[in-house]
Amino acid sequence: MEKPAPGTAAAAPTADAKQAPQRLAVVTGGNRGVGLEVCRQLADQGVTVILTARDDKRGKDAVESIRRESNLSNIVFHQLDVQDDTSVASLAQYIENSYGKLDILVNNAAVIGVAADEEGLKALNIDTETWISGRAASLLKDVFQNTYDVTMNCLDTNYYGYKRVTEALLPLLKLSTSGARIVNASSLASELKRMPNEKLRNDLSNIEIWDEARIEALLNTFMEDVKEGRLEEAGWPTMLPAYSMSKMVINLYTRILARRHPDMRVNCVRPGFVKTDINWNLGILTPEQGARGPVMLALLPQDGPTGCYFDQTEMVNVW
Ligand SMILES: NC(=O)c1ccc[n+]([C@@H]2O[C@H](COP(=O)([O-])OP(=O)(O)OC[C@H]3O[C@@H](n4cnc5c(N)ncnc54)[C@H](OP(=O)(O)O)[C@@H]3O)[C@@H](O)[C@H]2O)c1
């Protein structure tokens, strides 16, 4: 594999001399946390990895760290901001020109969707069990702020961003010769038992009625209720509402894609409660442990499951 050239990406082979590796993966938000470790583990398994990050320097430094520390050369950088259509189109064009196909897409990039008073949060000293059970909502109401802009940014990254990247890369995934895999990062916050509104909970568990238009109508209603300050009254999740909604709809989107593309393996995964910036480093697993589920799903055999949710490496039912 060639060394990355100056600029946004690794030196690309010319269009008439495409170098299609056996398996090629794209990982979003690959510069830190679970995403960085997914890149490392996939590269270690012999997959050629395009580590993407929205920031050029952070992304290139991440690639260099993997090359240096793990002595792996089958990893390159390309800029990708999942919120930016031009950036997404540029990545798709780069893959088409350089490799002519894609085998694995790991939609990993995400934000937590609250403005947090970090000092106040740490002072609460919430234990792991309370934190991950979702029961901490009332304790957290003074340290978390669900503003309209922060909420919109979360949905735009964690749902619309996954959809934007997936739609742009689907034509290349369809050209995979080893069998396309899509892995979407989900969370315990997506469990439908955490949805207080009973009608919505029942609707969300009925995959037959959902498509992207219906998901987007639901998110618009949610945003209206955020604007009017009536989240609790309308029965939306009170613990990390934007994040929870984004992950609930990512589960639906995963199942819609799996149904539409039966030849691909499309799954979603909770990496576990991993110590990373997204949870202010309150997690208990290492990124190395957190990456195992996404990597397992990225490397599923052709007869593997599709349209499923995994808690780390275990398939579970959250809907
Ligand atoms: N850690 C956990 O306990 C946990 C639990 C359940 C689910 N998850 C899920 O696992 C995934 C990885 O989380 P993590 O713990 O590794 O979080 P993290 O350490 O905060 O990393 C998040 C990554 O997403 C990137 N990102 C955010 N917005 C982006 C955008 N618009 N375009 C491109 N990249 C963007 C960040 O890039 P910058 O560096 O540029 O900000 C960073 O690389 C997420 O989907 C998360 O929801 C994590």
Image: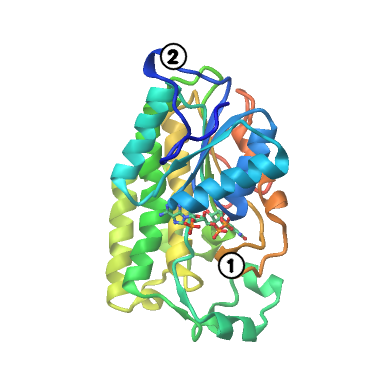
- Asked if 3 appears above or below 134 in the picture, the reply is above
User: Can you tell which quarter of the image residue 236 is in?
Assistant: bottom left
- Asked if 111 appears above or below 293 in the picture, the reply is below
Q: Is residue 37 left or right of residue 78?
A: right
Asked if residue 203 can be seen in this view, the reply is: no
Residue 32 % position (x, y): 58, 54
Name the residue tied to disc 2. Answer: 17
Cβ atoms at labels 1 and 2 below 8 Å apart = no
Q: Of helix, strand and loop, which one carries label 1?
A: helix
Task: Name the residue at the top extreme.
Answer: 16
Rendered image coloring scheme: rainbow
- Disc 1 to disc 2, C-alpha distance: 44 Å
Instruction: Please state, as top left, top right, bottom left or bottom right, where the N terminus lies in the image.
Output: top right
- Which amino acid type corresponds to the residue marked 2 in the rendered image? Ala
Return the residue nearer the eye: 86 or 244: 86
Residue in view at x 45 percent, y 22 percent = 99
- Which amino acid type corresponds to the residue marked 1 in the rendered image? Asn
Label 2 residue near ligand 1, CB within 8 Å: no
Label 1 residue near ligand 1, CB within 8 Å: yes
- Asked if 267 appears above or below 273 in the picture, the reply is above
Residue 18 % position (x, y): 45, 17
Residue in view at x 40 percent, y 61 percent = 154
Return the residue nearer the eye: 279 or 253: 279
Residue 137 % position (x, y): 54, 77
Name the residue tied to disc 1. Answer: 279
Residue 133 % position (x, y): 63, 69
Asked if residue 133 can be seen in this view, the reply is: yes
Specify which label sits upstream in the sequence, 1 or 2: 2
Q: Of helix, strand and loop, which one carries label 2?
A: helix
